Amino acid sequence: MADANHFDVVILGAGSGGYACALRAAQLGLTVALVEKGNLGGTCLHVGCIPTKALLHAAEVADATRDAGQFGVQASLEGIDMAGVNTYKDGVVQRLFKGLTGLIKGRGITVVEGAGRLVGRDAILVDTADGPQTLTGKNVVLASGSYSRTLPGLEIDGERVLTSEHALRLDKVPASVIVLGGGVIGCEFASVWRSFGAEVTIVEGLPRLMAAEDADSSAQLERAFRKRKIKALTGTMFESYEKTETGVRVTAGGQVLEAELLLVAVGRGASTDGLGYDEQGIAMDRGFVLADERCRTNVPGVFAVGDIVPGLQLAHRGFAQGIFVAEEIAGLAPTPIDETGIPRVTYCDPELASVGLTEAQAVEQHGADAVESLVYDLGGNGKSQILKTQGSVKLVRRKDGPVVGVHLVGARVGELIGEAQLIYNWEAFPADVAPLVHAHPTQNEALGEAHLALAGKPLHAHS
Ligand code: FAD
């Protein structure tokens, strides 16, 4: 008789990486068990991408209302009702959650609720409400995700010292906030709170905001944030903090800052502690699980996907790796994912979007003489003028070779990354893109014009 606890694939964690793997594996006819101690959908759906982007959209509505007069529309912003914002945000999450739950059920995936641990190379022990249950799999996929890190001595209390999870549950707009960390999560929350009317100070130890992006993008973001009166203290190391009667006092770079709340956004560690990975001999580095380009750990039959694997911590990378592993297990021999070809978007105002190499990385890889770059200012783009946004399209190419990096700054540019990632991933030359017709007036045209310019035939730009 078939063992009801034995599957082709057992997956630990039902976030972006885990559930995508489950859906694809089931589609390919494999039997799948998906272990989850929280909610199907994981960080991205419940406390990550989706709720933060809903907040950012509400922030955009607030800004549009506040600035309506600039467009001849009479409106005034009376205030932010956080209960209303949260109802909207939670409604989006709940609808998607319901859809995902139905989808997983519909594919015949066995969902096992409870905390799991790797107890053998092919076995996961789950602490379910009905007692322990051991699942075995021909293949095991580790997808236990990540958690908000803090700094030594900086204690998260969930009231004045918050992580992004707490920040998503606030029931009022703080008067002032210090955001520790000028990466994606820090910049996005800084942007939301500023739009909602808070005084915001970002403290970042590195010399610039969004330090993983092209230096030009960081510079433009800093300029835009300055205009929005978001204070960014870059190259400023956090030293200490204390709670006060009304909030927090932070010492950083010798300065003393006070605010109602402190958001700690200093990166995310891998959720791997105590899950038995070490004991089963899985090779790890600082809590992260090491996997090769085929998402294989060093232990045969055990794969790893998503945020636990060093690299970009992004939902769509998790999806792609999950799908890859399902196809690999099913014997489809999929093509490995080019990590550099994964698009990156930060949804603050203005948005930042990029794919491929920064100019500095391209120079490092190919040499300064072999790299050419071009910046097309959105000032020349009709739709950008209509939206009253500033920003640019920056292209980095190998001289006489393909485009190796695209970097975008401006309102709504996240929506342009689709074309940019095709350009990068298809290794297009500027001359391949130049003849493609872009709809007018869209900001996509700016991508087209930048390629025209790089191909030596600028239309609206100066030659
Ligand atoms: P997770 O989504 O973290 O899922 C792991 C799952 O495993 C969780 O559900 C957890 O409960 C479960 N689990 C862990 N341990 C166990 C155990 N022992 N037993 C059972 N279950 C377990 N990415 C983007 O691409 N775009 C964005 O706009 C974006 N915004 C973000 C905003 C914020 C505030 C945050 C925090 C993240 C954001 N991300 C964004 C990142 C994105 O959420 C992650 O990259 C993605 O969720 C990673 O997927 P994952 O499957 O690796 O892990």
Image (tube, rainbow, N blue to C red):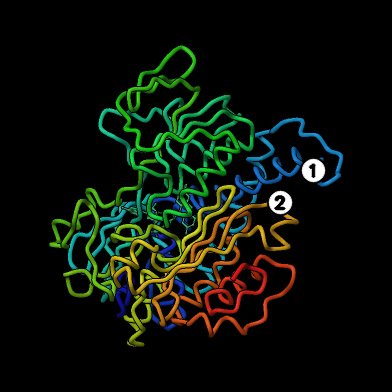
- Front position in the image: 118 or 320: 320
Q: Secondary structure at mark 2?
A: loop
Instruction: Tell me what residue is drawn at x 36 percent, y 87 percent.
Output: 332
Q: Residues within 10 Å of mark 2 (few under 14, many from 20)?
A: some
Label at residue 388: 2
What residue did someone put label 1 on? 70
Q: Residue furthest front?
A: 463
Q: Is residue 410 above or below residue 343?
A: above
Q: Looking at the figure, which quarter contains the N terminus?
A: bottom left
Picture quarter containing residue 181? top left
The quarter of the image that holds ligand 1 is: bottom left
Q: Is residue 236 visible to the viewer in this orientation of the structure? A: yes
| Residue at screen point 66% across, 52% down | 389
Q: Is residue 133 left or right of residue 32?
A: left
Three-letter amino acid code at the position of disc 1: Gln
Nearest to the observer: residue 461 or residue 207: 461
* Depicted 280 relative to depicted 403: above or below: above
Instruction: Tell me if residue 215 comes above or below residue 323 in the rendering.
Output: above
Q: How many marks?
A: 2
Q: Give the answer, above or below, for where 252 lies relative to 325.
A: above
Residue count near mark 1 (Cα–Cα under 10 Å), binned few <14, some 14–19, many ≥20: few
Measured in 3D between alpha carbons, the distance from the residue under mark 2 to the one under mark 1, in whole angstroms, is 9 Å
